Image (cartoon, rainbow, N blue to C red):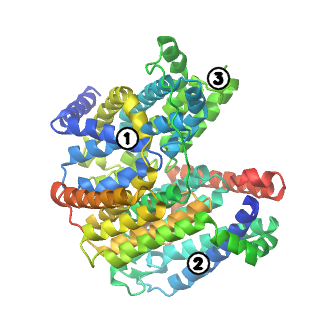
Amino acid sequence: MSQTQKTTTSDLIMGILMLVFGIYLIFASLNMKVYSTFLDAPGFFPLILGIIFILFSLVMLVGALRGGSIEDAKKTFHKESLAALFLSSQAKRVFILSFFMVVYIYGLIGRVHFAIATVIYLFATFWYLKSTTLLKSIIISVLSALIISAVFQYAFRIPLP
Amino acid sequence: MFEAFSQQFALFGSAAAQAFGFPQVFVTMAATVAGIVVGAVPGLTATMALALLINLTYSMQLPVAVAFLLGVYVGAVMGGCYSAIMINIPGTPSAAATALDGFVLAKQGHGGQAIGVGIIASFVGTLFSILILIFLTPFLYKIALKFGQWEYFLISVFGIMICGNLSTQSTPIKGWIVGFLGFFTAMIGLDAVYAYPRFTFGNYNLMGGIALIPALIGVFGISEILSVLQEDTPYSVESQLGRVFPSKELIKDILHTSIRSGLIGCGIGAVPGAGEDIAAWVSYDVGKRRSKKGHLFGTGSYEGLASAETANNACIGGAMIPLLTLAIPGSPPAAMFLAAIWLHGIKPGPMLAIESPDFIYLTAVTLIIATLSMLVFGLALVKPMVKILKINRKILMPIIVPLTVIGAYAGNVNIFDIHVMFIFGILGYILRKLNYPMAPLVLGIILGPTADISFRQALMQGQGSLLPLLGRPVGIVLMLAIVWSLYNGIKSSRRYTASLNTPSGGEGAAQ
């Protein structure tokens, strides 16, 4: 996929998202309570933001459509292009690294001790990235988790999650 | 007049005594060295380091916290030049322009001298901007005192507009969109006037709003980690270092460039949110056009190297000017500094000159100590630093993740803040991939509450009419500035769209 195709497609998608978001903001702000006048109402500023988002999204959409974004979007959303995008080594790597972070942040922290959660996360990430040998990965994971926990808890007196 | 001068002199003396006291002076030195290391390692940026370190300053006294953060800031901005010169990968985005000439010099075997020139240029730039900070800020306080609610609203909008214009590589609309998304983020939670819940969806955790520091850590920490680790970028360090300290002739040669670049860097630094990388590129571009040896830029020119390095460091003092006078950070790392001093009860703005009159001098003197430390340690540590560049990023970057978790959690001791940090990290990564700049987002989150409250209060003062507000002189200047940046932005957006439509231009324009 060319850079231009990627840019116009992303502009088209972002333009649509911003348009929807702007409309939502306007509706949400109009439904907010008015205390004395609308000028100092909680919804006044979000209303203006909604209008701004709609204006910017329209400018973006016009630019994207002039740049042939519909054709580009069709090409981008073609089965082969999508497969190339999601199965690229870069996308896979980001997805897996993010998955490790999700497990660490949402699954382990708060359920097991911070140091143990950190050892598991670091080891899994080092192993996946092939950062170093297996033995070194274990040693670095354990040492890093212990040092970080001890330094923050005892030297800086910062509570650990 | 004499009385006012002696009063300022006494304040300067008091601030100097604090900055040079124990342990502040040692903290500044140690933090500068730490900053140099952080800046040198590709992937670790000054902004990321400051975001992670803010929470460490909770238990510190104010002068120690200022020493710690400013030391890291000054060191990290300069530290980027080591990797830019020796491996052609800027340690921080602000050193990207440095690599153009620096790496060519390193390949020619003059890497040591190139680093020496970079450090001396950084020293001149930072010192120059501190002098401007010291002498200009007291006058700006007088102008800032004339700011009412309307002007505060306008300067917040102008900040987003100009930052969006300058920080994007493609169309300014992208910068503006993320800036106003930052404004929206600041709207989440209980409204500051009536305590009405906005966009909280009944979630108790969202009532208090999106915490600033976790959001900043996410945007500059998690998204940076993912960006660095997404692909293998093998690099090798140039082995030939050569002499480090530049000759007298070379220093003389770059002095003129350094003064010009210092002015440019400081000026760009004073523009809300613009930042060190923009300062370096603008200065490099001006240097190339103004210098007699401009045609040599990019082929291993010490002058080109000095243009970039002086400007990115001069940005530091410049960024402090709007921060201290209007509470508007001039760069993303300055935004982190602002968040940190808020935690310590310092409220920058026009009233700072009355509430904490010596704070500006404390900042300036600490910056001077950090700058001197940067010069001495920067030159002394060239050889060990080149070894540090060989560090395995696939080991280093994952270790930063637990630090971001602790950094996000420590402020409110709330797991929800860690979730906020992660969500902003992913959002930041996606926006980066789509060429959306991060600086306006940060500025938007910081300025959002000011813009909201100021706008509503200004309209209330005008009894619902804009007409009484339109005649205010400072407001007129700001409105003209907003219209000007909107006009310029739309013009460059059109140019960008046109370049996308031409088959050959599209590729380059989107880079």
Q: Residue at x 61, y 74 (%)?
A: A51
State the SS at label 3.
Answer: loop
Left or right, B483 with respect to B466, comes to right
Which residue is under mark 1? B37
Residue in front for this viewpoint, A111 or B378: A111
The amino acid beneath tag 3 is Ser
Residue B336 % position (x, y) = 37, 53
Q: Position of residue A35 (x, y in %)?
A: 40, 84
Chain on which label 1 sits: B
Which element is circle 2 on?
A: helix
- The answer as to whether the residues below labels 2 and 3 share one chain is no
**Residue B24 visible in the current orientation:** yes
Asked where in the image residue B37 lies, by quadrant, the reply is top left
| Distance from Cα at disc 2 to Cα at disc 3 | 48 Å
Q: Is residue B292 above or below residue B72?
A: above
What residue does disc 3 label?
B291
Q: Is residue B394 left or right of residue A142?
A: right
Q: Quadrant of residue B316?
A: top left
Chain of the residue that carries numbered disc 2 in the rendered image: A
| Label 3 vs label 1, nearer the camera | 1
Residue tagged by mark 2?
Answer: A21
Q: Residues within 10 Å of mark 1 (few under 14, many from 20)?
A: many
Q: Earlier in the sequence, mark 3 or mark 1?
A: 1
Badge 1 amino acid? Val
**Amino acid type, label 2:** Phe
Of residues B141 and A13, which is closer to you in this image?
Answer: A13
Q: Is residue B302 left or right of residue A134?
A: right
Q: CA distance from mark 1 to mark 2?
A: 42 Å
Q: Are marks 3 and 1 on the same chain?
A: yes
The quadrant of the rendering that contains the N terminus of chain B is top left
Q: Is residue B47 above or below residue A124?
A: above
Q: Along the line of sight, which residue is nearer the eye, B50 or B21?
A: B50
